[in-house]
Image (cartoon, helix red, strand yellow):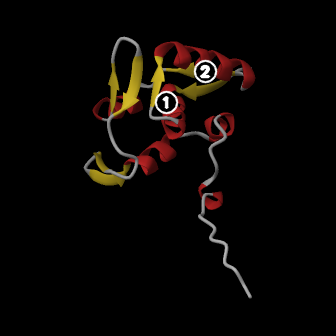
Amino acid sequence: MENVENFSSFMAGVFLTRREISCSELSYLMNDYSIKMNSCIVEDDDEFYMFNNFIHFDNKKIFVKEAYDDYVNINNRDICFEDFLYGLTSNDVKVYFNIPNRSNNILKIKTKVS
C-alpha cells in the first residue's frame, strides 16, 4: 500500500532546500519522490492556503517571497518563516531532500587549544 504525503509538506521541503523551482523541476521531483518513497502526493487545501502569502507562481517557476529569517503571521501567531516550513515538512520529505533534524543543525565552532 502506498503512503500518502501532503503537497504542503512536499513544498515546504522544496523551499527548505531552494528559494525557487521551475514547474518542470517540481513535476520531476514529485514523480521521483513518489517512486522512491512509494508515496502518493495529495492536495491538502486546508494547509496549502497558508502558502499563498509567501510564495509566488508565474508561468515558469515558483519562488519564495519571504526571507527565511522573517517572521510571518500564521493563524494570528508570529513565527519564523523557516520554522513554519520546517514544521510542515514530514520526516519522509526530510529524508528525501536530506534536510537535517533540528538537533543536528547546530553550528559547531572549532577552537584552537595550545
Marks 2/1: CA–CA distance: 10 Å
Q: Amino acid at mark 1?
A: Met
- Left or right, 41 with respect to 69, comes to right
- Give the residue at x 63% y 67%: 108
Residue 98, position in %: x, y? Answer: 67, 40
Q: Amino acid at mark 2?
A: Leu
Residue 66, position in %: x, y? Answer: 33, 41
Residue hosting label 1: 11
The mark that comes first in sequence, 2 or 1, is 1
- Give the residue at x 69% y 80%: 112
- What is the residue that sits farthest to the front in this orientation? 114
Query: Pointer 2: residues within 10 angstroms few (<14), some, or many (20+)?
Result: some
Residue 8, position in %: x, y? Answer: 47, 30
Residue 29 badge: 2
Q: Which picture quadrant has residue 59?
A: top left
- What is the residue that sits farthest to the left in this orientation? 76
Which one is in front, 105 or 10?
105
Q: Quadrant of the C terminus?
A: bottom right
- Give the residue at x 60% y 21%: 29
Classify 27 as above or below 66. above
- Left or right, 77 with respect to 88, comes to left
Query: Pointer 1: residues within 10 angstroms few (<14), some, or many (20+)?
Result: some
Classify 104 as above or below 22. below
